Image (spheres, helix red, strand yellow):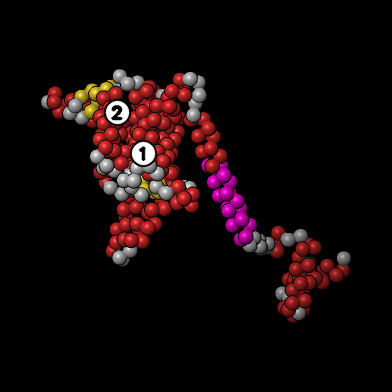
């Protein structure tokens, strides 16, 4: 019983997630589902090549010229996965390192480290592609962003212990060291070299982020200012569209009952009716009202 209780306690500890890490996990998993559902549908209609061509626009290209015509790709690629195990591996370490950063550095810095790490990984990939011919033609996945969180966790608290299922408590420095060894072996063995270069770029950014923070420079603040500006622009655009839609709709005319009309309004309405349909179209009540008004 103690063995199963220990596994249960480890599982509950492992599943502890901060809100911002949860959002990043949900976004990555949601994009994975959408991409694979779309691929399945296009595969049924024999459009797999069209899917791959479209997908390339959201990956980071090795060509700097191609990057100029798809400048959004350094952002989109860090949320894009096609392989299930690639996604699972990234989400496991995203949860692990993101929770450490949220606990020790603050939840407000998790997203900036993730985004800046992803951008640094994209830069490392593109630069390495100009000198190493076997890195590949494009890169996708959150690995660079996740390794930035790993680098930040290593610099912040290398002795921090993470409880792993069946392994118990393991220090962060050993977990990150194993990941770095895999990256170096992958580069040396020419296996997904571009992806491993992106990992190293993200890892370096994570180290520099915490180093700058300890020197009094918080790189998360400009990131949040940019995000706040963009969200404000989107909200403003949404309000403008709603106001244009509402102004384009014709304002329905409110009908007034005869009892709510003033004497002058009723008289004007009767005169308009005479112009349109003639005197004989008036009701007896309208004729009586017109007769009484003529005596005043």
Residue 252 in the image: above or below residue 173? below
Out of 65 and 158, give the one closest to the viewer.
Answer: 65
The residue depicted at 46 percent of the width and 50 percent of the height is 65
Out of 118 and 190, give the one closest to the viewer.
Answer: 190
The residue furthest left is 1
Where residue 159 appears, as percent x and y from the top left, is: 30, 19
The secondary element bearing badge 1 is classed as helix
Where residue 93 appears, as percent x and y from the top left, is: 30, 34
- The residue to which callout 1 is attached is 198
The residue depicted at 34 percent of the width and 30 percent of the height is 150
Where residue 87 appears, as percent x and y from the top left, is: 30, 43
- Image quarter in which the N terminus is found: top left
The residue depicted at 40 percent of the width and 44 percent of the height is 130
- The residue to which callout 2 is attached is 176
Q: Which residues are magenta?
A: 231-249
The secondary element bearing badge 2 is classed as helix
Where residue 44 appears, as percent x and y from the top left, is: 28, 64
Judged by depth in the image, the label closer to the viewer, 1 or 2, is 1
Callout 1: few (<14), some (14-19), or many (20+) C-alpha neighbours within 10 Å? many
- Image quarter in which the C terminus is found: bottom right
Q: Is residue 137 visible?
A: yes
């Amino acid at each position: 019983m103690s063995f199963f209780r220990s596994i249960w306690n480890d599982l509950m500890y492992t599943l502890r997630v901060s809100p911002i890490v949860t959002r990043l996990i949900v976004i990555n998993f949601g994009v994975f589902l959408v991409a694979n559902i779309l691929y399945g549908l296009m595969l049924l209609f024999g459009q797999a090549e069209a899917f791959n061509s479209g997908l390339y626009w959201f990956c980071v290209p090795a060509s700097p010229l191609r990057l100029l015509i798809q400048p959004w790709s350094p952002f989109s690629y860090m949320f894009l996965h096609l392989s299930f195990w690639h996604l699972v591996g990234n989400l496991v370490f995203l949860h692990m390192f993101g929770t450490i950063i949220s606990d020790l550095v603050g939840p407000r810095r998790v997203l900036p480290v993730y985004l800046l790490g992803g951008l640094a990984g994209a830069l490392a990939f593109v630069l390495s592609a100009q000198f190493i011919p076997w890195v590949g033609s494009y890169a996708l996945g959150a690995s660079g962003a996740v390794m930035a969180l790993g680098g930040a966790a290593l610099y912040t608290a290398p002795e921090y212990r993470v409880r792993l299922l069946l392994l118990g408590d393991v220090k962060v420095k050993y977990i990150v060291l194993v990941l770095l060894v895999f990256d170096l072996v992958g580069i040396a063995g020419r296996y997904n070299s571009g992806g491993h270069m992106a990992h190293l770029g993200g890892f370096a950014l994570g180290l520099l982020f915490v180093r700058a923070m300890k020197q009094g420079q918080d790189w998360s603040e400009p990131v949040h200012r940019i995000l706040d500006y963009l969200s404000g622009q989107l909200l403003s655009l949404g309000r403008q569209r709603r106001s244009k839609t509402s102004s384009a709709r014709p304002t329905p005319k409110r009908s007034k009952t005869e009892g709510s009309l003033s004497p002058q309004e009723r008289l004007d309405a009767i005169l308009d009716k005479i112009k349109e349909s003639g005197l004989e179209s008036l009701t007896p009540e309208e004729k009586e009202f017109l007769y009484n008004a003529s005596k005043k």
